């Protein structure tokens, strides 16, 4: 079995208009910048994909990665917990102009909805958001004297994530807090595509330290020395590069 | 009106109640300051939503590793005993009752423990982050805040007027004037600035204070 994909363009070639795409990362940590940029390249070349629903904790920063994807007009709806950051101008302007839909989800609920999607659990109850505006219209149930809000699973057509080491079978390890949503998203998407900083043969990762087992991964593409969103933004980078 | 504590002094006071070995989440912004004032001999273990337990302080400029950040997206450092985990485990720690203390900022706190700290209304881009999760599950949910708003209106109120973060969740408020517990739907005064009269404090508070027999002086070091 070999899940290796030869290049980034091939890795993102199956994403079609209107699909739901989960994108790993919390701010810049764990953001699969090269996969996102490959998707933008395809859009520049072909005009597709568009009308994507993107699931991420944030709404991007500056003019690279997720922010650039939004800036290209490829995202119709964002499902996220915190669309504010140091420089979320791209999303903010588009949102205030009515050009993008936002589904705001508390961060822990977002994580659990994705986990549930990957685990085959259609709904669950959480204390989070009970009695607040974000619980409006959702079923409420009492358990052991406390009130809980029903939330639904979240699934995706594709997940684009970044891992540290991956083997040819799709087993993954992550680097520090870049792990964040990635292991959950890998379980909740029909196709999980991973950019790994280091690709090794099967057997190259100690089974005791595998974080995401290969069953949750459909494709692995090696991107040595991946870009960091924070570093790109400090250099005021734009993607695609302005000529 | 009597002088009031600086934000640094409020953070210092909140830090004095954190036990050795406590698992603590500090909200982004002002609450992060609490970590600077751990009493000698005590070491809390700090949790951040994006998947780190037991991180250390900020690195020197130029030494940042952007895979090692806190929920405020600021660079932090490793310490002996640091652990990484994914977001579902992180919020299992939060909602599952495993954290000892969460310390948050506030726009308003109501006498029944309702907290409003995520939205000032329908204008602009709404953002909630982990605030609505953090108010559930920690054994103590404390708020650090100025006692009044910039235009001198009470932030401790009968009923919150801003969108709620959580219902009946706050257990203690460290303000610029007092330390107040929330018990049985009432504000119970524990400490106040010595120069401040009870009447003055009540006039700056939007709901009735319960005054027990013993109210301690709120005294902090000189910190700016």
Image (cartoon, grey):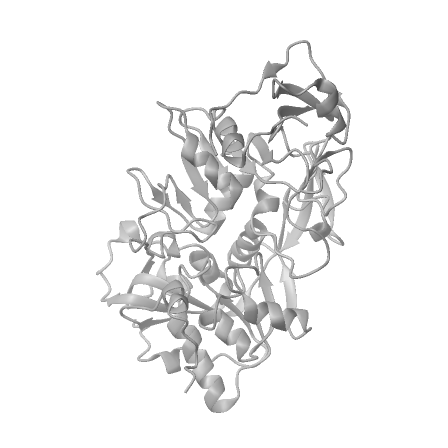
- Number of on-image labels: 0
Q: Looking at the image, which residue is at 48% across and 61% down?
A: A185
Residue B27 seen: no
From the viewer's perspective, is B91 left or right of B126? left
> Which residue is more in the foreground, B7 or B184?
B7
The quarter of the picture where residue A155 lies is: bottom right
> Which residue is more in the foreground, B141 or B105?
B105
From the viewer's perspective, is A200 left or right of A188? left
> Which residue is more in the foreground, A51 or B147?
B147
Residue B129 percent across, percent down from the top left: 57, 52
Q: Name the residue furthest bottom.
A: A46
Residue B34 seen: yes
Q: Looking at the image, which residue is at 70% across and 44% down?
A: B164
Q: Looking at the image, which residue is at 64% across and 69% down?
A: A95
Q: Quadrant of the N terminus of chain B?
A: top right
Residue A107 percent across, percent down from the top left: 56, 52
From the viewer's perspective, is A210 left or right of A119? left
The quarter of the picture where residue B137 lies is: top right
Q: Name the residue furthest top.
A: B213
With respect to residue A31, does B151 lie above or below?
above
Residue A82 percent across, percent down from the top left: 57, 57
Residue A87 percent across, percent down from the top left: 51, 64
With respect to residue A154, does B18 lie above or below?
above
């Amino acid at each position: 079995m070999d899940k290796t994909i030869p290049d980034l363009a091939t890795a993102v070639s199956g994403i079609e208009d209107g699909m739901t795409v989960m994108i790993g990362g919390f701010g810049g940590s764990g953001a699969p910048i090269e996969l996102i940029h490959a998707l933008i390249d395809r859009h520049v070349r072909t005009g597709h994909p568009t009308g994507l629903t993107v699931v991420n904790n944030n709404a991007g920063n500056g003019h690279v990665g997720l922010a650039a994807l939004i800036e290209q007009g490829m995202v119709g709806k964002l499902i996220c917990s915190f669309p504010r950051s140091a420089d979320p101008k791209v999303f903010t302007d588009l949102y205030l102009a009515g050009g993008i839909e936002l589904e705001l989800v508390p961060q822990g609920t977002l994580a659990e909805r994705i986990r549930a999607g990957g685990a085959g659990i259609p709904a669950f109850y959480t204390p989070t958001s009970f009695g607040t505006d974000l619980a409006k219209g959702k079923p409420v149930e009492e358990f052991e004297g406390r009130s809980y809000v029903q939330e639904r699973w979240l699934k995706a057509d594709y997940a684009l994530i970044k891992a540290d080491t991956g083997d040819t079978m799709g087993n993954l390890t992550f680097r520090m807090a870049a792990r964040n949503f990635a292991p959950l998203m890998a379980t909740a998407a029909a196709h999980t595509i991973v950019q790994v900083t280091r690709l090794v043969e099967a057997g190259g990762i100690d089974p005791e330290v595998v974080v995401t087992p290969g069953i949750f991964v459909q494709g692995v593409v090696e991107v040595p020395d991946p870009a960091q969103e924070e570093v790109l933004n400090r250099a005021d980078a734009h993607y695609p590069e302005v000529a | 009106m009597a002088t009031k504590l600086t934000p640094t002094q409020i953070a210092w006071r909140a830090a004095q109640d954190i036990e050795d070995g406590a698992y603590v989440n500090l909200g982004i912004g002002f609450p992060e300051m609490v970590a600077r004032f751990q009493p000698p001999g005590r070491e809390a273990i700090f949790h951040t939503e994006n998947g780190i337990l037991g991180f250390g302080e900020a690195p020197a400029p130029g030494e940042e590793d952007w895979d090692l950040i806190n929920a405020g997206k600021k660079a932090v450092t490793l310490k002996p005993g640091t652990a990484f985990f994914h977001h579902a485990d992180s919020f299992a720690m939060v909602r599952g009752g495993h954290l000892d203390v969460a310390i948050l900022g506030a726009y308003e706190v109501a006498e029944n423990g309702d907290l409003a700290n995520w939205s000032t209304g329908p204008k602009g881009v709404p953002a909630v982050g982990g605030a609505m999760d953090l108010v559930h599950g920690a054994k103590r949910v404390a708020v650090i805040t100025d006692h009044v708003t910039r235009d001198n209106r009470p932030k401790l109120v009968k009923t919150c007027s801003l969108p709620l973060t959580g219902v009946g969740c706050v257990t203690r408020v460290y303000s610029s004037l007092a330390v107040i517990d929330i018990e049985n739907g009432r504000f119970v005064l524990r400490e106040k600035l010595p120069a401040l009269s009870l009447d003055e404090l009540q006039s700056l508070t939007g709901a009735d204070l319960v005054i027990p027999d013993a109210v301690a002086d709120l005294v902090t070091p000189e910190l700016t």
